[in-house]
Amino acid sequence: MRDLDDHSSEPERKEQAPQMAHGPPSGSMLSASGLSPAAMKRKIGRRAAKKAARDPAETKGSLCSGKGCSCENCAGGKETKGTTTVFGSGSTKTLGVHGETKASYKDNYEITDQKKEPSKECDKGCPKGQCVHVTGNLKSTFTVTTQIKLPSVSQYPGLTECQKKAVQTFINTTLKEHEQKHAAAFAQYNGEELEPVDETGCISQLDPKFQARHTAKETQRKAAADLASRSLDPYDVDIPGFDCGDKQSADQQGAGDEDGSAYAATEPAPAPDQDDPHGSPDPTEEEAA
């Protein structure tokens, strides 16, 4: 006789029995899915690999495609800086006037128009998910800023007014023009270079390749600009008109000598002293007649 409160048949009771056991038995290493942790890990790994194959953006690591990138193992947005300073001068026997031009270099690179897809052509040492085929352009950017520093006449005490004027004119014209030539030579560094990229490899190995290519361009560009600037030196010229103080003194001395000669030529000779024993003798009677 069946219990009236039991509304299930015997077969149904047998089917429901396993459904009541919702978790693993006590002490079991199985997960809720019925798989061991190791088997579950392998399953998740295969699932992630399939997803990475479908979506290239899911490959581990990244290659930057914009400025200011700061991620690890990525190309682009990396900057270096350097400076070069040159001098020009004018001089006299007692005075040296010096100008200065300072060049500050800055460079960076990035991968533009980048396309990345998974690849299987890497060495065995490349971690899973980091083997990629990358295409695009290696864009290198180079900029230089120059600063010209000219001296002030006040740095040179003890000059006459005409010497100050000569030095100031030299600074404003000859010396300034020379330093501007240095700035123009340094400006050859400015510009951009594009190089096609078509590389397959581990992401961590590709970035050093791109960095090396960019560095080679930067080194060559900076060396050319520095050489163009150095070719303008040594530059040491005379300051026109600086000897005006010596000339002015000589002119004044010469004017004084001429005045003395004129005075000597126009001043009447004094009459001889009557008591001078060497005075003129009295005229004879014949001379008087």
Image (tube, rainbow, N blue to C red):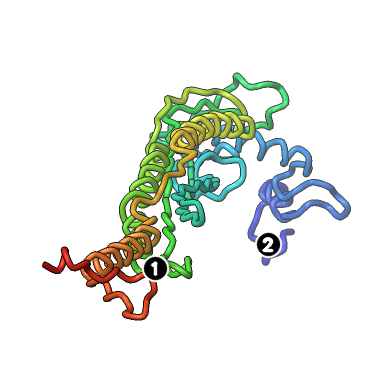
Badge 1 density bin: few <14, some 14–19, many ≥20, Cα 10 Å: few
Q: Residue furthest front?
A: 285
Q: Considering the image in quadrants, where does the C terminus appear?
A: bottom left
Looking at the picture, which amino acid does disc 2 mark?
Asp
Q: Is residue 209 left or right of residue 145?
A: right
Q: Nearer the viewer, mark 1 or mark 2?
A: 1
- State the residue in front, 87 or 24: 87
Residue 160, disc: 1
Q: Is label 1 in a helix, a strand or a loop? A: loop
Q: Residue at x 64, y 60 (%)?
A: 7
Q: Residue at x 72, y 55 (%)?
A: 22
In the rendering, at what x and y percent does residue 78 appear? 53, 45
Looking at the picture, which amino acid does disc 1 mark?
Thr
Q: Is residue 17 left or right of residue 165?
A: right
- State the residue in front, 168 or 83: 168
Q: Is residue 55 visible?
A: no
- State the residue in front, 173 or 272: 272
Q: Considering the image in quadrants, where does the N terminus appear?
A: bottom right
Q: Locate residue 130: give its quadrant.
A: top right
Q: Residue at x 40, y 59 (%)?
A: 246
Q: Residue furthest left?
A: 289
Badge 2 density bin: few <14, some 14–19, many ≥20, Cα 10 Å: few
Chain-order first, disc 1 or disc 2: 2
- State the residue in front, 204 or 210: 210
In the rendering, at what x and y percent does residue 278 appear? 37, 69
Residue 6, disc: 2
In the rendering, at what x and y percent does residue 136 appear? 42, 29
Q: Is residue 234 left or right of residue 173?
A: right
